[in-house]
Amino acid sequence: MYWIRRSSSAIFAGFVLFAGAAADLSARPVVESVRVGDQIKKTRFVVDLSAKVSFSVFTLADPYRVVIDLSEVDWRLKPDAVRPGRRITGFRFGLFRSGQSRMVLDVKQPVNVTKAFILGPSGHRGHRLVIDLAETSRPAFLAALRRSKPASSRIKRKSPAVRPSPPPKARDTRPLIAIDPGHGGVDPGARGRGGSWEKTITLLQARELKRQLLRTGRYRVLLTRRRDVFVRLRERIAIAQRAQADLFISLHADSISNHRIRGGAVYTLSERASDKEAAALARKENKADIIAGIDLNEQSTTVAKILIDLRQRLTKNESVTLAKGLVSELGKSMRLLRNNHRFAGFAVLKAPDIPSVLIEMGYLSNRTDERLLRQAKHRGRVARSIVRATNVYFARQQALRQP
């Protein structure tokens, strides 16, 4: 690693580079376009911006990725803004967390970030973020990666005024339902034949389900994400656990190569999948953190430890009970697959203390399923079925607790 000086600014080159810039908090900068220039030994990636931004760049291994974090921006990009080329094989973008947007480049081989800098407006061009990538060997890549730590960028904000705490409210004992809209932000999930994104469909369905659950007056409801933002898999579990949720319902809409297959299914946790399709789906969904540019080497052994928690045996049984009720009710409002209750090792279902199910609402790869999932009327029917199954589940739980 070394320092490169250009004029009065310093650029830290290697695996991690950082450039700070003041940001206008009242109007977010816009990413207007991106461009890729491939050469024999290097690739230049250019981001066209409406204004100067703060940014950081770092690389990850297994799989090889280049991650570009920006102060929060708006996007004017198409999903296929970057086509596969000499080194870059995939491109994703979106909101990573509040105040921070992210772009992820999948690359074929190890690369060094040799330069990263902002160019000011010139001629018909506005602000540009320029990133140069050069090929390197895997040993050199890993050695440099071990020595590097991602730089961070923070925009200064005024601290909120301290207000006196309100008096404590009486404890609400109604069951708390955690609804998990799958994917989000830089992780878009599956894409439908008509252009729909899974992250959009799941959030729309989650909002409708929340509305209908609250309307009963029987439940409190929590969403693991309320907008188009990325949430790590284990953080989704943690959100539900911190709130002491009584149920966890994860919503998804997959895409497969056979466009003729349509229908939904309900999944519960099992380390041994019920069939090959369930195992493949779990593997795909569990890659969400990789897709969003998360270093999986930082994962602790917490999830592995909780899998042997004895409490999970009871939780699994309750999850299966809920799943059976969901299959019964959902079958009245939507088409289900023939094998409609399946088992697989989904990461988001691994809370040992919360009965959890994952609902695949249909296949976006099927035009009929995609068309229905885009309709508010259909989402309303699906939500009503889930509410009915939830009512039956808690009525049964209450009956079991009575002497």
Image (cartoon, rainbow, N blue to C red):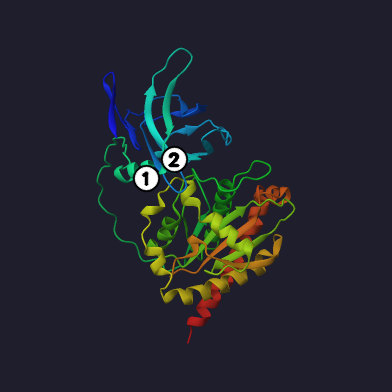
For mark 2, what is the residue? 110
Q: Residues within 10 Å of mark 1 (few under 14, many from 20)?
A: some
Left or right: 110 as drawn, with respect to 146: right
- The reply to whether residue 211 is in sight is no
| Label located before the other in sequence (1 or 2) | 2
Question: In the picture provided, is 244 more to the left or to the right than 363?
Answer: left
Percent coordinates x, y for residue 235 in the rendering: 41, 56
Q: Identify the residue at horizontal 46%, vertical 29% (top origin).
A: 41
Q: Nearer the viewer, residue 113 or 244?
A: 113
Q: Does residue 142 lie above or below 344 as drawn?
A: above
Residue in the picture at 54% in, 61% down: 213
Quarter of the rendering containing residue 126 = top left
Q: Position of residue 396 (x, y in %)?
A: 55, 77
Name the amino acid, label 1: Leu
Q: Secondary structure at mark 1?
A: helix
Residue at the right extreme, as displayed: 260
Q: Quarter of the image containing the N terminus?
A: top left
Note whether 370 is above or below 310 in the view shown: above
Name the residue at 46% across, 12% down: 123
Residues under numbered marks 1 and 2 in contact, where contact means CB atoms less than 8 Å apart: yes
Q: Which residue is mark 1?
A: 142
Q: Residue 319, relative to residue 333: is it above or below?
A: below
Residue 253 spot, x, y in % from top left: 61, 53
Mark 2 residue type: Pro
At mark 2, the secondary structure is loop
